Image: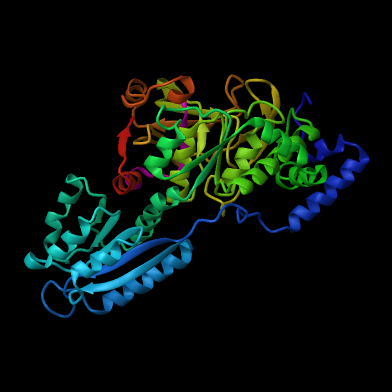
Amino acid sequence: MSESLSRRQFLGTTAAGGVLLAGQLAAAADAAPAETADWAAPLPPVTIHKTYIGRTGGIYLSRPTDEIQKFEAYLANIEKQLGDVKFVGGETIPPADVAAVAAKARGADALLLFHLCGHGGDAPPVDVLARLGMPTAVFSQPFSGHGWMDFPAWQKAGKPVVVLPTSDWGELDQIVRLMRVGPHMKRTKVLAIGKLQGTDAACSPEKVKKALGTEVVQIESTEVIDAHKAVPLAEAQAEAESHWISQARKIVEPTRDEIVSSARLYLAVKNLMRKYGARAVASSHCMGAPAKGCLTFSKLNDLGLVGACEGDIDSTLTMLLFGYAFGRPGFISDPVFDTAQNALIHFHCTCATKMDGPSGKRLPFTIRNQGDSDQGVALDVEMRVDQPVTCAKFVNLDTMLLSTGTIRKVTHDELGCRTQFVTEVADARRMFHNWGGGVLAGGTMTRLHRTVYYGNHAQNIEHLGTLMGFKVVTEA
């Protein structure tokens, strides 16, 4: 189709039987509950050992005894809200013996310490547990004693310890989210279709497994083609109508059959992910037969999983890290600079429509063809203007490249890929000259791609780097 059509006009161009079927499917889609990713490989709960340290009661530099019960109730609510974390332990030191607590804590995935009070001789139990080498967070409110002066030494010694010297209990919510990331990565499988692309270290499944515990399962595109053929046509038609045709703001170039074929690819990849127990897919065959992967990746990301184009394993791992940490999908971008606007302009032909996360509302989107080839099916998603964003890429399995900005404008330049937006950054000229932060090498795609997320996550990525042992390099 050479002209832009609304969905109603688009359906009107099909055969009468097709229109009837589409109408029936649309009605069914309106009545159906929102799809979830409960079909994906489940992740076991992350165990976090909690311990309370310091005197309780009414004496100087002591917090009230009932504060422990308040923390217990607060943690129980976090456990309920997240659904994939289990708090264990709960000892109070004193009277519990620190050595005995340390022995128990080593069986957990992470350690959460509450510094109730400590001054002089009361601080060492915190120090003993913080130096176990486990991913650890220490929550230390004001008026909990003067032991806080010794706490920064843990990070200087290379220990994976994050200290929260704050009165805001809400910071516990996010630090617990971050403490889940490393364990989840160790239990995650990535399905790689074809050759991996990216930094040398990340392109080695053995090195990925050693660094993160993540397993990379490689298959050939022929298996995807066979899986695509195996999906019943009626199932693909229902998927195309309910998730794409009925929801699009408009449809420009693609035909209905092309959209159905793209929906069929999603169902094929879904079946393969179930077969291999994967929660992420990276494909270097996303531009070829049987259909382009743009819709597939978009829906996977909408569901809280990961779909990454062009076999980009660095971006795949980045999206997993951010997804587990913040519950939001990433947008893989081919960025360009415009120093006249102090801007980094992001664009690509696939994008999640739920950039706020699986429970968020879908952004408006138009179904287009893929910009580079003028073929297949791609997405033009309308990003939210004035939305703060984080731009990142986890490279070499040991470094997170990071910058922040704010979306100022949505564009539709035919020279770029379909989804486009202009991001105001701190210093575009400086960022231009510091691109890659001096640590990134490789081919064009490796050096170019970044992933973009709603929200400013800079401080929490610093915390995650401490917990997981990677460096954070700011590009601007």
Q: Please state the total of marks drawn on the protein image.
A: 0
The residue sitting at 54% across, 30% down in the picture is: 311
**465 sits left or right of 285 in the view:** left
Can residue 78 be seen here? The reply is yes
- Residue at the extreme front of the image, as rendered: 206
Q: Is residue 432 above or below residue 302?
A: above
What percent of the width, then of the height, locates residue 110?
A: 33, 58
Instruction: Tell me, yes or no, if residue 116 can be seen here.
Output: no
| Residue 334 image point, x, y percent | 50, 26
Q: How is the image coloured?
A: rainbow
Above or below — where is 378 with respect to 119?
A: above
Residue occupying image coordinates x 12% and y 63%: 124
Does residue 276 appear to the left or right of 112 in the view shown?
A: right
Q: Residue furthest left?
A: 120
Quarter of the C terminus within the rendering: top left
**Quarter of the image holding residue 418?**
top right
Q: Nearer the viewer, residue 284 or 217?
A: 217
- Judging depth in this view, the residue of 319 and 111 nearest the camera is 111
The correct choice, above or below, for 185 with respect to 82 in the image is above
Looking at the picture, how far across and down is residue 300, in whole percent?
Answer: 60, 44
Position in image of residue 199 (x %, y %): 42, 27
Foreground pick, 264 / 450: 264
The verdict on residue 56 being magenta is no
Q: Residue at x 82, y 36 (%)?
A: 9
Give the left or right position of residue 50, taking residue 330 as reference: left
Which residues lie in the magenta part?
A: 449-460
- Please report the residue visible at 39 percent of the width from the left and 62 percent of the height from the top: 47
Q: Quadrant of the N terminus?
A: top right
Looking at the image, residue 255 sits to the left or right of residue 69; the answer is right
